[in-house]
Image: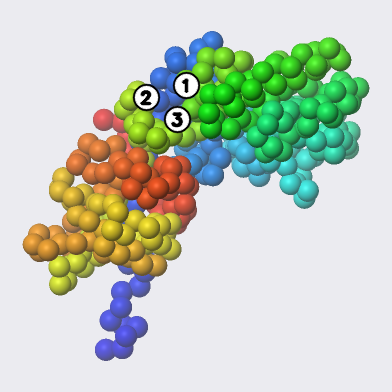
């Protein structure tokens, strides 16, 4: 028998899978909406819905009453429109690349986060080039100190005046920014600068419908950061910010469960057919555990196509279901436990997982 014949192909070891609890996602959104009201919630679905699946997550959000989705980039925003997410839902893209099809974005009614005078002029030109007239929906971004794009305070009056002057092709829907969420003092300074930027915009004739600054953590913990809209990503998926705060303490439920089926057991090791090639960090070795029938087994090694578990008593068998992380209801580690053990944050773990791992969406019990 040749080596090729004796080694099962990768596709035969398919049983790694991600289970996504859309009901838990909808409940999390309800908890968040109650917390931040009267501000509206934009559900951020970037990075393929934080690895949970873009379209199922987007549809679950809109079915739960969410009327704004954060797509990050124009390609993702257009995917949402092409999938039937209509104009009644605000779809926001704020990462504009030089080669993006801005005409398609404007024609599809995508709300565009604009961070510079050049971007503003490009968006206006795209709107003017459309065969059927449609004004571009623009949110101007002010840099309040994070320096993650955005118009500088010095150029802000000029850019806002230009947006007002472009009123035949531009609808100035919003003014927005990112804040660091690093310390209360820094965030207070950013909020103060944001108020000033809004006042400057209004003084030159701008009438924005929406002001938005806060992401998950700020929206939860700082009422003064909420304004008209908050952009919530990680918290919607039951992913906490770390620092000792668990999802349960926030009233949230982890949405993702990652499972794999034991493939082989030999010499005190059980092998799972999921590895670094699937997005599992090699730093998991020696730091995290996996649950089988409620009992924890330490991860001893992460290779390209598999994980080894310590099985010193020989209890595991091929075909056993192993839960890498989940909500913790079956004795498994939570995503937060994995993140803390590997000195990272939960969203980094879930967004690294390969899109080749099947996502399944169980019906609510």
Label 1 element class: helix
Q: CA distance from mark 1 to mark 3?
A: 11 Å
Q: Are marks 2 and 1 in contact (CB under 8 Å)?
A: yes
Q: Residue at x 26, y 62 (%)?
A: 300
Residue 162 in the image, given as x and y percentages of width and height: 89, 26
Q: Which is more N-terminal, label 3 or label 1?
A: 1
**Label at residue 236:** 3
Image quarter for residue 270? bottom left
- Comes first in the chain, label 2 or label 1: 1
The mark total stands at 3
**Residue lying at 58% horizontally and 19% vertically, measured from the top left:** 225
Q: Earlier in the sequence, mark 2 or mark 3?
A: 3
Image depth: mark 2 or mark 3 in front:
2
Q: Write down the residue under mark 2.
A: 250
Residue 91 position, x and y percent, is 63, 30
Residue at the far right: name it.
Answer: 165
* Residue highlighted by disc 1: 220
The one of 66 and 132 positioned closer to us in this rendering: 66
Taking the spot 36% from the left edge, 31% from the top edge, the residue there is 245
**Any part of residue 127 in sight:** no
Q: Quadrant of residue 277?
A: bottom left
Real-space CA distance between mark 2 and mark 3, rounded to the nearest whole angstrom? 11 Å
């Amino acid at each position: 028998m040749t080596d090729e014949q004796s080694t099962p192909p990768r596709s035969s070891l398919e049983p790694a899978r991600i289970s996504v609890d859309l009901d838990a996602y909808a409940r999390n959104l309800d908890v968040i909406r109650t917390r931040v009201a009267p501000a509206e919630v934009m559900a951020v679905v970037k990075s393929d819905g934080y690895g949970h699946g873009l379209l199922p997550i987007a549809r679950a959000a809109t079915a739960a009453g969410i009327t704004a989705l954060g797509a990050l980039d124009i390609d993702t925003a257009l995917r949402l429109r092409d999938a039937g997410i209509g104009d009644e839902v605000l779809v926001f893209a704020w990462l504009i690349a030089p080669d993006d099809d801005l005409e398609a974005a404007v024609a599809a009614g995508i709300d565009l986060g604009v961070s510079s005078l050049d971007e503003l002029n490009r968006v206006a030109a795209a709107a003017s080039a459309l065969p059927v007239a449609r004004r571009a929906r623009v949110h101007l971004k002010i840099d309040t100190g994070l320096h993650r794009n955005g118009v500088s305070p010095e150029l802000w009056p000029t850019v806002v005046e230009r947006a007002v002057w472009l009123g035949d092709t531009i609808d100035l829907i919003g003014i927005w920014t990112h804040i660091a969420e690093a310390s209360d003092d820094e965030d207070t300074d950013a909020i103060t600068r944001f108020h000033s930027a809004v006042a400057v915009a209004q003084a030159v004739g701008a009438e924005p419908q929406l002001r938005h600054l806060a992401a998950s953590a700020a929206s939860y913990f700082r009422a003064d950061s909420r304004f008209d809209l908050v952009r919530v990503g990680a918290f919607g998926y039951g992913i906490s910010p770390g620092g000792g705060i668990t999802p349960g303490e926030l009233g949230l439920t982890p949405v993702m469960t990652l499972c794999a089926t034991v493939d082989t057991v030999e010499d005190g090791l059980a092998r799972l057919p999921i590895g670094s090639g699937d997005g599992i960090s090699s730093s998991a070795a020696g730091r995290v555990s996996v649950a089988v029938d409620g009992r924890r087994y330490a991860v001893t090694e992460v290779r390209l196509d598999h994980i080894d578990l310590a099985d010193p008593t020989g209890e595991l068998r091929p075909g056993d279901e192993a839960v890498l992380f989940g909500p913790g209801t079956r004795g498994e580690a939570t995503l937060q436990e994995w993140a803390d053990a590997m000195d990272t944050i939960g969203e980094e773990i879930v967004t690294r997982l390969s899109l080749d791992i099947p996502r399944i969406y169980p019906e609510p019990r």
